[in-house]
Amino acid sequence: MEEQKEEQEIRDHNQMKKRFIREQIKPQRRKNVIRLLHYSILVLCAAVLFGGISALSFTVMQMYFPWQDLDENVVAVPARPTASQLMDVQTVADGVDQETLSNLENFDKVSSHLAKIGGRANEAIVQLDKSDTTFSSVFAARDVSGSMPYCGILFHESEKSYFILTEYSLADYADSLSVAVKFIFGKTVTAKVSGANERLGLAVVCVEKSQLTKQEQAEMVIAELGDYSTLSLGRAALVVGKPNGRIYSVSSGLITSEIIPVPVLDHEIQLFTMDLSYQKDRRGFVLNTQGQLVGMLSAKHTKETGEIDTAFFSLSDLTEDLNRMIQGRETPHLGIYGIRVRQEDFKTLGIPGIYIQEIALKSPAYDGKLRVADVITEVDGQAVQSMDELHRYLADCQSGQEITVTVYRLDDSQSKKKKLKVTVR
């Protein structure tokens, strides 16, 4: 009996052991295997992702930081030559390969070329200040401090006058729109502000040629206006005027961002940035590598460009405004800030045109019942789809002229067409 009981207990124990293995151990092993598989998959995905990011980063850095080119341009510093080597100059020269020497020579030639362009352009730079009887001493004192005077650039010539581009604040500062102008060859004359545009921050100063001798007129350099299409990401550009805060200094850099559209009143300007460290008091004009005047430095738009690089706006789209300032005329004022309706906004707005973001208080647009979120599609029956097109149309108008502005306005979830009469001024 005892033996049978013992055998039965063994059998029961074995059955319980098998049940425990079946119900506890095997599921636990299965969970461990599944967990291990999950971890393996996660590690594999992380490795693939990390590899992809590394490859992409390497590709981008290769595009913007060509290491091969850097390696080719780095010259290793040779060890101190021995006495015998000092006797043989050619032996030392042979330590630098000819390709590296050629690259250095080309770099030096480019630097020299840019320096000549900058030096030549600086001959078109003038100093501007409030006109008074002691302006010569004022010029001298402020030039030493590096804070004043204003700088301008000769950019246009007529039969009887020279015209200088400068910043609007000078016109606002000058008494009776009269300023003193000092040329690079030392002559100082009195001039008048012929036109100013507060919206763009520009002014044009007119100098009568009769104040200058024939020899002095022969020495004048007039900057040639160029198009911003000559600028592109990574290309070199020059800054003349006061790029480091001192008059007649020259700086160069590379374009770091291009064609950033920024709405201004009744217009839109194109901003660029270049890799000159941002300085609040920096003033000057931007040239392309052909020496053409393409832009003017701006410290007003750091919200759009940041404060790391130096921002400048293109002058290409402002030729009509410059011509009006030369002639002493103002571009009629509508009073809106707007942007072109983007393709992705068609579902909401339903039509291409100019979306009004802001309306100046008491402006012609405000008095004419235009409102924020209206979409302008036509002016006097002529289609307009951008602020540039609207600005060009306004430039042909006269102050006091009544125009018909066609807008689409959302009303009860429906876009309704309205024609509004506006008198520009």
Image (tube, rainbow, N blue to C red):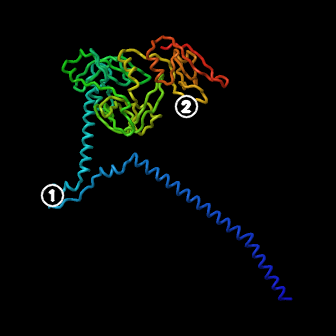
Q: Under tag 1, what secondary structure?
A: helix
Q: Under tag 2, what secondary structure?
A: helix
Cα separation, mark 1 vs mark 2, equals 71 Å
Q: How many marks?
A: 2
Residue 273 seen anywhere in this rendered image of the structure:
yes
Q: Quadrant of residue 325?
A: top left
Q: Is residue 212 left or right of residue 314?
A: left
Q: Is residue 404 left or right of residue 212?
A: right
Question: First in sequence: mark 1 or mark 2?
Answer: 1
Residue 168 seen anywhere in this rendered image of the structure:
no
Q: Quadrant of residue 5?
A: bottom right
Label 2: few (<14), some (14–19) or many (≥20) C-alpha neighbours in 10 Å: few
The residue positioned 14% from the left and 61% from the top of the image is 84
Give amino acid for label 2.
Gln
The residue positioned 40% from the left and 45% from the top of the image is 64
Q: Which residue is mark 1?
A: 86
The mark found on residue 343 in the picture is: 2
